[in-house]
Structures are given as C-alpha cells and as structure tokens.
Image: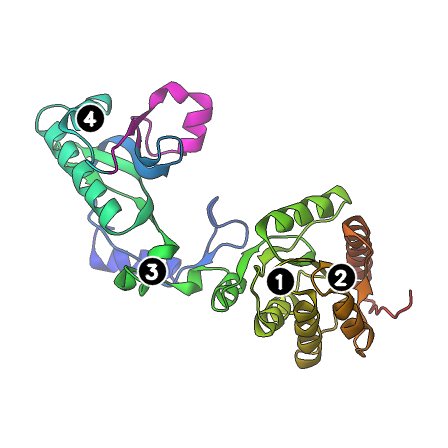
Amino acid sequence: ANSASHAEEISSKMLNQVLVTKQTGEQGRPVDTLMMVERVFIRRELYLSLTLDRETCGPLIVASQAGGTSIEDVAKETPEKIFKVPVSIHDGPTDEQLSELANNLGFSGAAADEAKNLVNMLYKMFMDMDMTMVEINPLAETIDGRVLVCDSKLNFDDNAEFRQKDIFARRDVSQEDPREVAAGKHDLNYIGLDGSIGCMVNGAGLAMATLDIISLYGGTAANFLDVGGGATRGQIEKAFEILNDDPNVKAIMVNIFGGIMRCDVIAQGMLAAAENIGLKKPVIVRLEGTNVEKAMEVVASSPFRMIMAKDLDDAALKAVRIANIVKQAEDIQVGVSFELPL
C-alpha cells in the first residue's frame, strides 16, 4: 500500500473473506484479522527452519537458498539445495556450525554476522518456548543488506501448555476445525477428514486399522476419533454428539477392543448419547474384549437399535454399504431409515 487510504481499501477486500490455500484445504479459513508490516525490497529469498529430529534425537536446522517456494517441492526436485545441521540439545549450535550455515546460505560480512545472531536467537526461542517447529519462509536479504524474517510458522508442544500459558492463551479457535476444538475440550483425540463414515475407536493403532479397512471396502472415513483406554460415559456421549452433528457423516462405525476400556461402559455411553441427542444416524458396532457379554445385554435391552457386527470385516462392509445407501437417498432427496432385524 502506498498510503493509509490505499491500505484501508486493500484491507476491506480481505477482511471477512475466506482464504483458500494449500495449507487451508478447500474449505479455507475466515479472515478476521490482518497484520500490517513494513514493505521491504528483497534481494534474495531463503529458507530456514528448526525442528525436532528423531534420527539425531535433538534439534535440527534445515536451510536452503531456494526460499520463497514450497520446501517440499525443493526437496523433491533439487534435494542438493537443502542442507541440515544437527544441534546438540545440551550445548546448542556452535560458532562453527553457525558460520557454516551462514556461508551455505550465501551470506558474507556484516550480513553473515546478522544471520548467525538471528539463528542463535531463534534457537533460544525454540527451546525456551517448547516449540516443535519454527519455519521461516522466506528468510530475506534486502537490497540494503539486512537479514529479515518475512514470514514464519510456529508450532508448540501441546504437552507444555502448563508451562506456556501466555502462548496458549493466544490460541484462535476460529481458525480451527470446530469438531476438533469440541473434542479437545473433552480430551478426545479427534482429526476431521472428508469421508462419510464417522468412526469411534479406542487406541490409535486400532483407529488407523479401522480407517484402512473402511478404505479397503470402498468407503472413506469422516474422522479419526480415538477415545483412549480410560474414556468415561460422558466422553463417549460427547464423541457421539460430535459425529451426529457432522453433516458429512452418513453412518457411524464403533470399533472397540475392550482391554482397559470396558465394553459395557462404551455401550452405556452410546445408548445415553442416542437418547440425549436424538441420534438418527445408523450405528454399526463391533465390540470385543472386557465385559463384551454384558455390553451385548445392555444394547439388546435398549429401545435404540444398533447394527451389531460379528468382526471388523463385517462392521466395515456394513458401514460402507449403509453410508452409500444414505448418500444415494440424500442425492435424490429421499429419506431413509433402518429397522432391525435387517
């Protein structure tokens, strides 16, 4: 913008709109706030990031002179342009590492000293604020020789919220999937997907297997939802509420292997949810493990009828076929309901 009025004109075209990028997905994100910064004239665009590396069990600096573009594309097409510097988690980056980094990024003289100082400060911020990643793209060298961070992305360790209260207080839930926000409030591990079968599973491994077998039978999952091994009746009820409120969900598949998690607790939570939220969507249930017989009795004695499956294959096949029936009926604006026995 060349003036305050010009900035206001541009801002009016951006505020209250939906921004769609590769990062946001097709649904986009609402533009509620704008950040105004100094206009700079860039001579070179570079890439710089700090992350945690499993292989070296410590921080890792990743850098490239090919900044201002997707680093994934650079890694795929010209991987030789990316260099990595493992850092001791106890000592931090050495002066030798910083000098080599500045040199590899093409800095010299005062700009090299400025770049080294910048990386040092970034590393301190990374460690002090319990970050899992800081990504700068682009890191710029201006025509007057300054080294500036022009755009960045920061990720923080959720487990460090108790230590970083000021940081987490700035969380803007309007930029997040409302389903994930609601699930997080009840300590449910939820990730929204774009399929038609809502999944409720206990255990991350079993959840991944459930998504895979749904795909194997030609369906697509609407979510990853792990209620964990110690879920309460209230958490189960909330999980069903989230799945029931999702317009993309045409059928709900419950896959529980009761170890620490008792099958009868799951059954009681499902039935309480069905009664309290007026659940109308078909529910396919596969239960195995602790107290499974008692759970079957609870389900059988309830007025809310669920579609029971004898094993995981049977559950996935029924879920995919039922979701397809519901979707096809909706496409021609016809209502459909299911009665048992089928």
Give the mark nearer the N terminus: 4 vs 2. Answer: 4
Give the mark nearer the N terminus: 2 vs 3. Answer: 3
Image mark for residue 261: 1
Are the residues tagged 3 and 4 within 8 Å (C-beta)? no
Quadrant assignment, res 292: bottom right
Residue 110 falls left or right of residue 22: left
| Residue of label 2 | 285
Q: Amino acid at mark 1?
A: Met
| Residue of label 3 | 161
Q: Amino acid at mark 4?
A: Gln
| Quadrant of the drawing holding the C terminus | bottom right
Element type where label 4 sits in the image = helix
Residue at 33% across / 56% down in the picture? 160
Q: Position of residue 72 (x, y in %)?
A: 44, 32
The span shown in magenta is: 61-89
Disc 1 packing (10 Å; few <14; some 14–19; many ≥20): many
| Alpha carbons under labels 4 and 1: distance apart | 50 Å
Q: Tell me how the rendering is colored.
A: rainbow
| Alpha carbons under labels 2 and 3: distance apart | 36 Å
| Residue of label 4 | 97
